[in-house]
Image: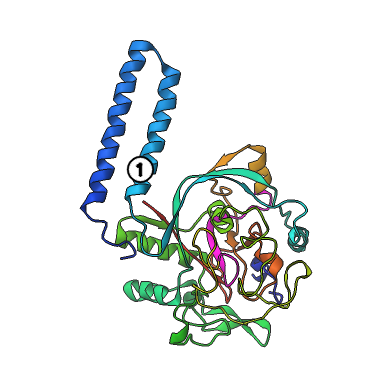
Amino acid sequence: MMKRMTMRGGASQMRGDRGLGEGGVAALMYRVVLLLLSWLRLMQRKWRIASMLSALVLAGVMVFSTALYAVVPAPKNFVLIRGGEFTMGSQESEVGRDAAKALYKQFGIDYSETQHQVRLSNFYISKYAVTVSEFRSFVEATGYRTDAEKGGYSYIVTDGQVKKGEGVNWRHGVSGSVRPESEANHPVVHVSWNDAVAYGEWMSKKSGKTYRLPTEAEREYACRAGTTTPFNTGNNLTTEQANYDGNYPYNNNPKGVYRQNTVPVNSFSPNAWGLYTMHGNVAEWCSDWFGGRYYDECKASGTVTNPAGPATGSYRVLRGGLWYSYAIYFRSAYRDHDTPGNRGYDVGFRLVFVP
């Protein structure tokens, strides 16, 4: 892996007590929708109003879906993201887009950030990346062994160089040293996509609800928080707003600091939707297979609803940028990737909750 090369493929409780009201209210709403549908079917036979029925059925389903999210409280540290339509990808003139395309070209990948319309349903997403402390609870509860532990190594950074760290795993920091307790609130690193999925499955099993990785579309939508600029902070991202190598600022802006490590997950101000470190600190796993030209396929299909990525692939999507990298690779539209079993000093994850 080259220094600061973000294309990592080249290198290779939670719910609080819901209370008795939630289930009862949801069940009541469900019965109301069923009664409405039954009445509409009767009216269809009587007045032959098929088109009206279809429209009202859809409206009923939407009302029920919205009501369900209204009565199910968010788990601790999760935020409800209201669904909607947005423009995914970047403008051709966006600074950094051509550099990303050139980087991928070195590895024979035809890369695209083609803008296209995406429609998403409501979802909850964690305010923060999963921490060292939270991942420790998972391991202690299950005895789970990460890919780094099974493989005997992970990638680290020492003296400014990326190296293979023998015996390094989730307990260690970016340079391969064991994390001190003072870094328990830092994002866990040295975790693979497989490890992130296993963590979500554990959360799901113990809660009876579904926890999963976000899709690439959900991750960008949540990161943007309604913005259309390169960053959710506007046309620039400073090191007072995110953790990256400040020697390489965006679009020739003034240089900043280089912390040479991760920072706590609640560092800096959150974006407009209350989410922290959506730019920088660590890149974060998404559920999708990576497809270099997938956005072009989406654009050709018109507005796509809840896209989940290509059906197959060799790499999984990473989003968000990392503490060791340049600001141009922190843009909301930038797409990174790695193999599902790979891990290193620069990658973590956050989860989505599905009621």
Q: Position of residue 307 (x, y in %)?
A: 55, 46
Q: Quadrant of residue 252?
A: bottom right
Q: Quadrant of residue 224?
A: bottom right
Question: Badge 1 is on which residue?
Answer: 67
Decide which of 158, 334 is in the foreground and name it: 334
Q: Quadrant of residue 334?
A: bottom right
Q: Is residue 313 left or right of residue 134?
A: right
Q: Number of labelled discs?
A: 1
Q: Residue at x 60, y 58 (%)?
A: 314
Q: Position of residue 93 (x, y in %)?
A: 78, 54
From what the image shows, is residue 233 above or below residue 166?
Answer: above
Q: Quadrant of the N terminus?
A: bottom right
Q: Position of residue 141 (x, y in %)?
A: 32, 73
Q: Residue at x 50, y 63 (%)?
A: 275
From what the image shows, is residue 177 above or below residue 274?
Answer: below
From what the image shows, is residue 347 above or below residue 124?
Answer: below
View extreme (left): residue? 20
Q: Residue at x 54, y 48 (%)?
A: 308
Magenta region: which residues?
Answer: 278-294
Question: Is 285 part of what is drawn in magenta?
Answer: yes
Decide which of 102, 40 is in the foreground and name it: 40
Q: Residues within 10 Å of mark 1 (few under 14, many from 20)?
A: some
The amino acid type, in three-letter code, at marker 1 is: Ala
Secondary structure of residue under mark 1: helix
Q: Position of residue 145 (x, y in %)?
A: 42, 74
From what the image shows, is residue 215 above or below residue 206?
Answer: above
Question: Is 269 part of what is drawn in magenta?
Answer: no
Visual colour scheme:
rainbow
View extreme (top): residue? 47
Q: Residue at x 73, y 77 (%)?
A: 255
